[in-house]
Image (spheres, grey):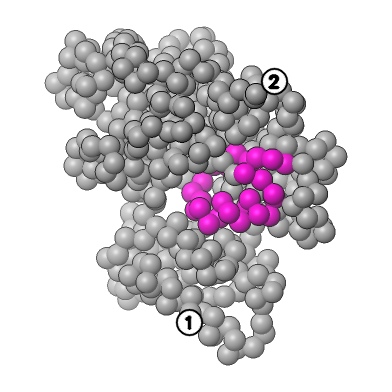
């Protein structure tokens, strides 16, 4: 029988033993940060807390939060907790407001990261007999490097394709009989679309599973990808922190390495399991870049009910949006994922663009939606009727009416990395 765990003893650890391990690691990590990261030590002093006040995970709430703004303010070395000579790699996020955010890794940190990615691959059914095609971007982005290393740990044949060049992706996929696909969900959908255009049916490829993340996607989009590629699609949140098992009832958090909390995004109050709020992570093992109580801005729910897969680590629901990506339009909270859900329920592909602007002190709200080839019509009355029906469906979901524009097939630019869905022209932060 195929082993369904990469590290069985840890992944199925008894809850009491897991909490004891977390408390021990938290005490050690807080001391490490206090002694080596002056920026966070000053934040702790300001909050009136010292390492002696943290005796276990029940004291986690006493520690101050970190945000992406803190990481930008301390660029490039302000959060580094070891000598630079002990670091073997950096990774970086894209800088949307100027400075990039850099994360540093010791070899221990890289090994931990790759182990977590290996857990995700094994949970999706990967073994040393598989061919893992990694189409996440390589370079500074974490996606490619993480699943590349995880695939090596599992012993799978790894195709380090990186993103883009879809023609080459398909050639290697078919010729080398790839069995596991790793990329963003929007690119997976595009690959499925491209295969169909070339006359391939889902059963023509050898894929059995896909690990898709790095951007929001809906259950409806999951079903569409599964149907177009003939696979089981698995969600992954941050490549290191979480992964989805075959039960697919939330993503397991690697709790031996990360503590998760749900807080009220406005007050910072810790909420009970089962309540919706902002996800906060604390890294328990990272040496070079050990973030304590990092606010992800993702809105979700934690679930500690037993999982039939046998893993005891808590599960998080798919993020329901981001507190910082949420659009407030005419006083109403709007998440792009809500719009995507409606589109897929109404039979449209998830190829869309949201444009928000402010004209004469009033918000404008436009949604551009690409028609499928079989939906396309060049009659004005036909398009108008479809736009009206979709507008009604969006109003029911959102509480406000966007102006819907149905556009011809292939007219919205495809993404080979993270899809850019929202253009907000209001300059609300100027």
Find the magenta span and give its range: 207-232
The local crowd at label 1, few if under 14, some if 14 to 19, many if 20 or more residues have their Cα within 10 Å, is: some
Q: Which residue is mark 2?
A: 155
Q: For the residue carrying disc 2, how many other residues have a C-alpha within 10 Å: few (<14), some (14-19), or many (20+)?
A: some
Residue pictured at 45% horizontal, 56% vertical:
337
User: Any magenta on residue 394?
Assistant: no
Q: Are marks 2 and 1 in contact (CB under 8 Å)?
A: no
Report the front residue among 12 and 426.
Answer: 12
Q: Nearer the viewer, residue 265 or 11?
A: 11
- The residue beneath circle 1 is 388
Question: Which of label 2 and label 1 is nearer to you?
Answer: 2
Secondary structure of the residue carrying numbered label 1: helix
Q: Quadrant of the C terminus?
A: bottom left
* Quadrant in the picture for residue 378: bottom right
The residue sitting at 58% across, 83% down in the picture is 383
User: Regarding mark 2 in the picture, which secondary structure is present there?
Assistant: loop
Residue 145 in view in this figure: no
Side of 211 relative to 28 (left or right): right
For residue 23, what is the image quadrant? top left
Q: Position of residue 273 (x, y in %)?
A: 27, 37
Q: Earlier in the sequence, mark 2 or mark 1?
A: 2
Quick check: is 221 in the magenta stretch? yes
Q: Position of residue 258 (x, y in %)?
A: 39, 24
- The x and y percentages for residue 306 are 38, 32
- 368 over 220 or under it: above or below: below
Give the residue at the far left of this rendering: 48
Residue 235 % position (x, y): 53, 41
Residue at horizontal 39 percent and vertical 50 percent from the top = 320
For the residues marked 2 and 1, what is the alpha-carbon distance in whole angstroms?
Answer: 53 Å
**In the rendered image, is residue 385 in sight?**
yes
| Depth check, front residue: 370 or 290 | 370
């Amino acid at each position: 029988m195929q082993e369904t765990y990469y590290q069985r003893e840890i992944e199925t650890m008894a809850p009491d033993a897991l909490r004891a391990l977390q408390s021990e690691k938290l005490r050690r990590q807080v001391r490490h940060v206090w002694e080596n990261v002056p920026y966070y030590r000053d934040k702790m002093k300001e909050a009136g807390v010292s390492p002696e006040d943290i005796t276990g995970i029940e004291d986690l709430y006493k520690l101050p939060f970190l945000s992406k703004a803190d990481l930008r303010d301390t660029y490039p070395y302000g959060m580094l907790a070891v000598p630079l000579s002990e670091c073997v790699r950096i990774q970086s996020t894209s800088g949307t407001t100027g400075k990039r955010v850099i994360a540093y890794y010791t070899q221990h940190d890289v090994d931990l990261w790759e182990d977590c990615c290996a857990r995700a691959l094994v949970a999706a059914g990967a073994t040393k007999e598989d061919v893992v095609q990694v189409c996440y971007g390589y370079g500074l982005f974490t996606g490619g490097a993480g699943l590349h290393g995880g695939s090596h740990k599992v012993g799978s044949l790894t195709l380090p394709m990186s993103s883009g060049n879809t023609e080459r992706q398909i050639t290697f996929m078919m010729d080398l009989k790839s069995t596991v696909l790793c990329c963003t969900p929007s690119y997976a959908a595009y690959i499925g679309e491209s295969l169909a255009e070339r006359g391939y049916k889902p059963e023509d490829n050898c894929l059995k599973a896909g690990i898709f993340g790095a951007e929001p996607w809906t259950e409806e989009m999951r079903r569409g990808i599964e149907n177009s590629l003939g696979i089981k699609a698995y969600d992954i949140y941050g490549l290191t922190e979480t992964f989805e098992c075959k039960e697919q009832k939330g993503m397991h958090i690697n709790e031996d390495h990360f503590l998760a909390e749900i807080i009220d995004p406005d007050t910072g109050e810790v909420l009970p399991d089962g309540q919706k709020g902002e996800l906060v992570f604390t890294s328990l093992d990272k040496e070079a870049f050990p973030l304590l109580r990092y606010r992800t801005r993702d809105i979700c729910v934690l679930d500690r009910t037993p999982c039939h897969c046998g893993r005891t680590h808590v599960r998080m629901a798919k993020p329901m949006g981001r507190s910082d990506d949420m659009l407030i339009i005419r006083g109403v909270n709007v998440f792009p994922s809500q719009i995507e859900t409606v589109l897929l329920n109404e039979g449209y592909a998830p190829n869309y663009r949201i444009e928000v602007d402010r004209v004469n002190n009033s918000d404008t709200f436009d949604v551009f939606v690409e028609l499928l080839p079989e939906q396309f019509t060049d009659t004005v009355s036909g398009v108008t009727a479809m736009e009206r029906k979709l507008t009604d469906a969006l109003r029911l979901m959102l509480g406000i009416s966007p102006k819907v524009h149905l556009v011809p097939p292939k007219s919205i630019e495809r993404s080979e990395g993270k899809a850019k869905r929202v253009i907000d022209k209001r300059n609300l932060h100027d």
